Image (spheres, coloured by chain):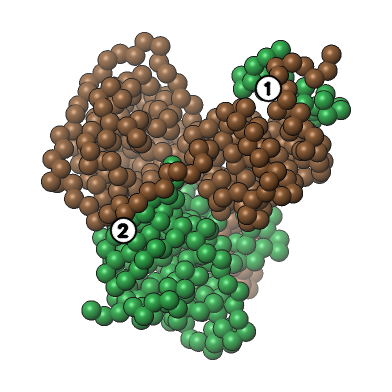
Amino acid sequence: MVKIKVVVCIKQVPGTTDIHIDPQTNTLVREGVENIINPFDNYALEEGVRLKEKSEEISQTVALTMGPPQAEQILKDALSVGMDEAVLLSDREFAGADTWATAVTLAAAVKKIGDAGLVIFGKQTLDGDTGQVGPEFAQRMHMPFIGYVSKICKLDRKSIQAERLMEHGYEIIEAQLPAAISVVKDINEPRVPSLRGKMKAKKMEIPVWDRHHIGLDAEQVGLSGSFTQVVKVFTPQSKHEVMMLEGSTAEQVEKLFGKLKQLNVVQGA
Amino acid sequence: MDIKVFKDKCTGCKLCQKVCFYDAVDIKDKMAYINENCILCGACIEVCKFDAIEIKEQAPDMDFTDHRGIMVYLETHDGRVLDSGFELLSEANKLKKDLDTPLYALVVGNICQDEAKKAFRYGADWVYAAMHAVFENHFDDIYSKVLVKTIKKVKPDIFLGAATPFGRTLIPKVAAILKTGLTADCTGLAIDSQSKLLKQTRPTFGGNVLATIVCKKTRPQMATVRPHVMEKIEIDAPKQGQFKEIKIQPGHYGTQYKMTGTDKKQEESINLSDYEVIVAGGRGLGEGKNFSMLKELSEVLGAGLGASRAAVDSGWISYPHQVGQTGKTVNPKIYIACGISGAIQHLAGMQTSDIIVAINKDAAAPIFKVANYGIVGDVFEVVPKLIERIKSGKPLIE
């Protein structure tokens, strides 16, 4: 049996969620916002690098992203923290992709990369917040999927055992490889790139694949390949004014108690 | 690309670039170019003063008249239907009035019939129940099989499920098998009066931007909905609808997974979304042992115990308690933030709570911007007094 590759799927996002519309000009305020690696994906990258460091079973780690040509930067960042290879999926026809079209595109690329035993995602992205691409990707690849992984207990060429964080506590689940997982922040502490890592990343050429490289039809990618469509984007109305409860501590607490009583949370005089 | 900029009309004024949420407009030689980031949301078209941008409509919509009704998936745990499912049924019961269609509940789990029939109390016309020990473990392959089978048979127009950790794993899998559109973690649902499409509104950018999404091309239109956003409404005199038991032959429900262990011995207050009230602490608590004070407050209030990232990263409390972008998203009726400054990442996880109470010594803390009631004060004075007040039931001042 051949050694496995670990593929980590990452996304470039605006470096803040503090994005809002200026009510006067109706324009977007995003001054000084840089594009960064989706913060959740740093845990996915770190886990990929650690798995390779620990295990003889892994031949290579590959960082994969879909995005505009500028997204090359986050792949450089991924290489600088220790990923072996990187691939950029970039094509104007990928534009407008929903989670399904994204999953289809990533799946085609992972197939082309070949020998992927484990595919790691961050739990969700900072901008889209959906967390849907991982499970949809896994289904497209007919792989098992373990979401919200907080610890990889065991990984060999055949199987993975991982601890996942569910609503009511932790569960330890085992699945056969190839498999896909999404990881939460608890899993590790991402490293800072070393100077040597940065130098190495700078020199490396990153291949750019378009739709034709991964053998997809125009109807399968971008908006054409998407089932859902955004029809409106807007900022929520700020709902209220805060009511400050003033006075001495005793008076403040008394007022708060009154409010909690109105809300039926507490009882008493 | 289905978006086009007319060269003769575009002046390169950059207005479209400014309104674009996705950094999808490049300006070169006084002309706008749309790049790969574009999701065709149309914000640029609305703002353009020169009608220089156009999105070409897709091919005519397909005929979906054979799909009728709304189906709600009810998740179960330890033999009980989760409240998030009843909330969704209540919301679907409102939506169905705009569509004049039946409401189906689909209950899956290792549960009894009486538990499944509770769905009638929240407006279900039909209850489909898959009740079997094979559903004891929450494995997405086993569950997806029964969901897909039922959806294919009943052909609902709309399918809804709660955005719990399991729901957010299972439902994307089901959508991918059915090859239909799915919108994640919605906070608002409505029926478009003309097209009758389900308008699915969800927060993005950590809740600072809302997006409304539709699914025109495929059926069912699927969405996961954030727990506790919708209100659970029990019907006064529920009519007894149709109850259908889905026969389960265990041999057909094989799995790729193996459960090798669970750890449920965690502290009780771990499942934050179970609680209508959450008490949460942050950096202002100073050190880990001070969380015992908040624990006491949470106990007298019957509340869950949450924390900011700062508190978790300092090792004062375990990660499952973390609320915010890298932790959990919660929507309790009341969220009491103690010594939490309200970093944008924290607000992303709790700002849709019905009522927010903030206790912080810094009057300028951003938490007060989202709070309904604010107390500027020392948490070490306010919280013990509040505990005392609740326990004694007697006013602190005459």
Give the foreground label among 2 and 1. 1
Which of the 4 image quarters holds residue B126? top left
Which of the 4 image quarters holds residue B147? top left
Give the chain ID for the green colour: A
Q: Amino acid at mark 2?
A: Glu
Disc 1 crowd, CA 10 A, few/some/many (<14, 14-19, 20+):
some
Q: Is residue B369 visible?
A: no
The residue positioned 36% from the left and 80% from the top of the image is: A56
- Residue ID for mark 2: A174
Q: Amino acid at mark 1?
A: Lys
- Please report, as a chain letter, where disc 1 is located: B
The picture places residue A49, in percent across and down from the top left corner, at 47, 75
Q: Is residue B17 above or below residue B236?
A: below
Q: Locate the N terminus of chain B and report the quarter of the image it occupies.
A: bottom left
The local secondary structure at tag 1 comes to helix
Disc 2 crowd, CA 10 A, few/some/many (<14, 14-19, 20+):
many
- Residue ID for mark 1: B391
Q: Which of B228 and B282 lies nearest the eye of the viewer?
A: B282
Chain B: drawing colour: brown
The residue positioned 45% from the left and 43% from the top of the image is: B265
Q: Which mark is residue A159?
A: none
- Please report, as a chain letter, where disc 2 is located: A
The picture places residue B239, in percent across and down from the top left corner, at 30, 13
Q: Locate the C terminus of chain B and report the quarter of the image it occupies.
A: top right
The picture places residue A50, in percent across and down from the top left corner, at 47, 73
